[in-house]
């Protein structure tokens, strides 16, 4: 098992592209440094925010290996790259991703039950994959919403937790009571529940979730990190910050991940907001988008200054 805990604020990493659609590796290296400088506890590479469904297997492997190399042990890195429904293809891609040197390999729950057949099919697929992967490789689970959101049942979660092979679940239930129940189910096991929904992030932290794993870690991971680590000492500021974070995250619907790339283009992390997953002009589709982003940036800097002044 990894010697470093997968907890804290864990960005779901973007993949910068050049305007020609190729991966921008210098931009990605700057993005890694930005995540680290802003308090990230680990990195989740080759995930949905990375546009993994639009990357070849060769690109997914290269991307995962690059992130591991550039992180250089400063914080843990987990990778997915799990995009196929066909079982043989799943084995091929997961075995390839298992060799990039990451601290954990994340399985996508909907591919464990692609035809929505239920727990027996889920377990059968999972057991086949587990037998094909190295026994000493820490694993995780990701309730990725594409192609469909496949939430774990309590029985399935317990099965994975009791196996001892899983270290994290990226929880996409978006329901605080479900999160609390899952914390109880996994208590005393290596499996950590990591909420990915901004609306319940603060309440989930207070309930015992060790951090945050949502998409707005691409805008202000340091603010989520402060909320996780210091909210008890400054409850009034924490409450105000939590409200700002919830309202900011609503803008995910305005063309994410291109919206996050527009932000990083503004601050100079990389040059292009090119996406493979989005083939339209987000400014044309979402009116006053830059004005929305202005307010997110203004609010982010406002709270950074207040925290720095404590």
Image: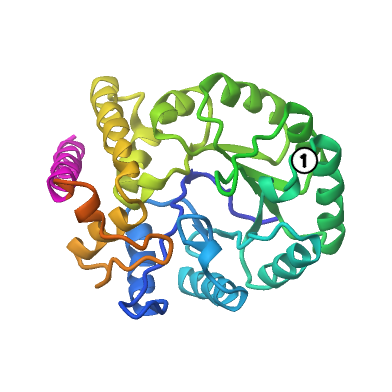
Q: Is residue 147 visible?
A: yes
Q: Is residue 84 magenta?
A: no
Q: Residue at x 47, y 68 (%)?
A: 71
Q: Position of residue 230 (x, y in %)?
A: 35, 32
Q: Quadrant of the C terminus?
A: top left
Instruction: Please tell me which residue lies in front, 286 or 143.
Output: 286
- Dominant SS of magenta comes to helix
**Residue 264 higher or lower than 207, as above or below:** below
Q: Is residue 106 left or right of residue 241?
A: right
In the picture, residue 185 is in which quadrant?
Answer: top right
Q: Residue at x 81, y 49 (%)?
A: 126
**Residue 238 higher or lower than 20, as above or below:** above
Q: Is residue 82 left or right of residue 26?
A: right
Q: Residue at x 55, y 70 (%)?
A: 64
- Would you call the spot at circle 1 few (<14 residues within 10 Å), some (14-19), or many (20 or more)? many
The stretch in magenta equals 290-310
**Residue 293 higher or lower than 226, as above or below:** below
Q: Is residue 297 visible?
A: no
Residue where numbered disc 1 is placed: 160
């Amino acid at each position: 098992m990894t010697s470093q805990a997968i907890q804290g604020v864990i960005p779901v990493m973007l993949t910068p592209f050049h305007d020609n659609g190729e991966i921008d590796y210098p931009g990605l290296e700057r993005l890694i440094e930005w995540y680290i400088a802003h308090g990230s506890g680990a990195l989740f590479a080759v995930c949905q925010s990375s546009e993994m469904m639009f990357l070849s297997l060769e690109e997914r492997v290269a991307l995962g290996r690059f992130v591991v190399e550039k992180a250089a042990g400063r914080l843990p890195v987990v990778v997915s790259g799990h995009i196929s429904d066909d079982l043989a293809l799943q084995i091929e891609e997961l075995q390839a991703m298992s060799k990039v040197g990451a601290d954990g390999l994340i399985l996508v729950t909907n591919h464990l039950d692609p035809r929505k057949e239920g727990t027996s099919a889920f377990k059968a697929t999972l057991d086949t994959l587990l037998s094909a992967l190295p026994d000493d490789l820490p694993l995780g689970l990701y309730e990725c919403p594409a192609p469909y959101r496949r939430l774990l049942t309590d029985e399935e979660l317990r099965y994975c937790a009791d196996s001892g092979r899983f270290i994290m679940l990226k929880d996409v239930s978006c329901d605080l009571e479900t999160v609390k129940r899952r914390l109880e189910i996994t208590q005393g096991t290596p499996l950590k529940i990591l909420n990915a929904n901004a609306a319940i992030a603060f309440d989930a932290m207070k309930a015992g979730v060790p951090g945050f794993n949502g998409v707005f870690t691409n805008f202000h991971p340091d603010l989520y990190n402060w909320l996780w680590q210091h909210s008890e000492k400054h409850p009034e500021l924490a409450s105000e910050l939590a409200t700002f974070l919830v309202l900011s995250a609503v803008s995910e619907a305005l063309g994410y991940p291109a919206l996050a790339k527009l932000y990083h283009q503004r601050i100079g992390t990389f040059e292009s907001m090119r996406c493979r997953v989005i083939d339209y002009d987000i400014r044309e589709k979402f009116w006053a988008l830059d004005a929305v982003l202005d307010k997110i940036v203004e609010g982010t800097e406002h709270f950074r200054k207040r925290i720095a002044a404590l």
